[in-house]
Image (spheres, rainbow, N blue to C red):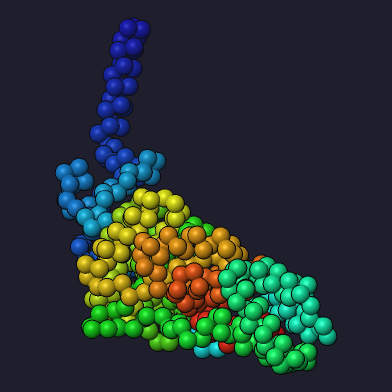
Amino acid sequence: MDPIILISLASVLLVGLVLLVFIDRKPKRPRGIYPTTRDANDPGPTGTGSTAVLDRPETDDAGPAGTAVAEPEAPVAAPVPAKDVVEAEESTAPELETPAPAAGRLARLRARLAKSNSIFGKGLLALLSTDNITDDVWDEVEETLLLADLGTEPTMELVDNLRERVTVEGSRDPQQVKAMLHEELVKMVDPTMDRRLDASRKEGRPAVMMVVGVNGVGKTTTVGKIGRVLVAEDRHVVFGAADTFRAAAAEQLATWGARVGVDTVRSYEDGADPASVAFEAVKTGIEQEADVVIVDTAGRLQNKANLMDELGKIKRVIEKQAAVDEVLLVLDATTGQNGLAQAKVFAEVVNITGIALTKLDGTAKGGIVVAIQRELGVPVKLVGLGEGPDDLAPFNAEGFVEALLD
């Protein structure tokens, strides 16, 4: 056969095969791109401890309301929610932990506190129990109290009172000296201060608590532990994750809530407006008839005016719905006197009502309790004595002093 004819036939067959393949092949979407439609009542993204519904605005680019497009190789940021927050619904955690009762926590943790402050108590008792208390001994007593972060003014006051009593009573018996020291320290810590957390419903609305402080003091962990304290007292609690700048802060808080059945109001947008989250948290608490809404805020340095102004804004936005009943300042006890400068600025911006003192079982000195209360005029209400979930205790002046002198 003529080669030209053979080449022509082969070309025809090749074209036919190509056409056959294309005709038989069904059109496919690019891998990984699937438009999905969700009903407005259908739960959206779920965070630990809460079922969330994302309120998305209608946009021309995103298609009909509720439509989302996912591209695994090049993720596209989701549209900013209209309210920029996620509303919390009832937690679906199958098993809930039972927190330890709040009553008696400080007593159970007394050994830990006594161990960390043993030098303070033993040193003072040893000095005051000597046969001859000279001026040099009193200087050592004063130095011991200053090293315990008691502060200059309280130290001088305590030394003067002890010196007078020892002179008048003339006793060197260790038990009597311990009793005198105990009485004077209790006076310094001031058992008359109201240390109750304002966490009960009032006038048909939940109490609102803000938790503030600088970076790294353990605010989010403290919020989680406070939630456990209140759940142990059968309070209905709602968390507000208004720390929208630290990665995983909301997830961390939601995890704390999930353990004990506390709903967490949070945003899934990075850098969302913290005031909006706080507003929605209070709104959710009102709708659920909760006893208390606890709002966690981002850590901020006290010398950053714009961040402190933002803290004031969060409080003002919350107050559009309900008064802020409790503003708890979290302080790291190991920072000692350095924490007082932080406390002063926060007190000016948001009117601090109480102190939560963390890491008191570490290298902290017990005297910081007195110094803080004297400086701010507000009580220490909670103390953190360890890393465990129930290692946060309501503060008790008598129990605290007993632990120092144990």
Q: Quadrant of residue 89?
A: bottom left
In the rendered image, which quarter contains the C terminus? bottom right
Q: Position of residue 37 (x, y in %)?
A: 22, 55
Is residue 29 depicted above or below 176 in this figure? above
Report the front residue among 304 and 57.
304
Q: Residue at x 66, y 78 (%)?
A: 159
Q: Residue at x 78, y 89 (%)?
A: 172
For the question of whether residue 359 can be seen, the reply is no
Report the front residue among 111 and 239.
111
In the rendered image, which quarter contains the N terminus? top left
For the question of whether residue 266 can be seen, the reply is yes
Q: Position of residue 205 (x, y in %)?
A: 25, 80
Side of 256 relative to 125 (left or right): left
Is residue 60 depicted above or below 47 in this figure? above
Q: Residue at x 60, y 68 (%)?
A: 152
Side of 129 relative to 251 (left or right): right
Q: Give the farthest residue toward the right.
A: 131
Report the front residue among 8 and 373.
373
Q: Residue at x 70, y 91 (%)?
A: 168
Q: Quadrant of residue 297?
A: bottom left
Q: Position of residue 39 (x, y in %)?
A: 20, 62
Q: Position of residue 257 (x, y in %)?
A: 42, 72
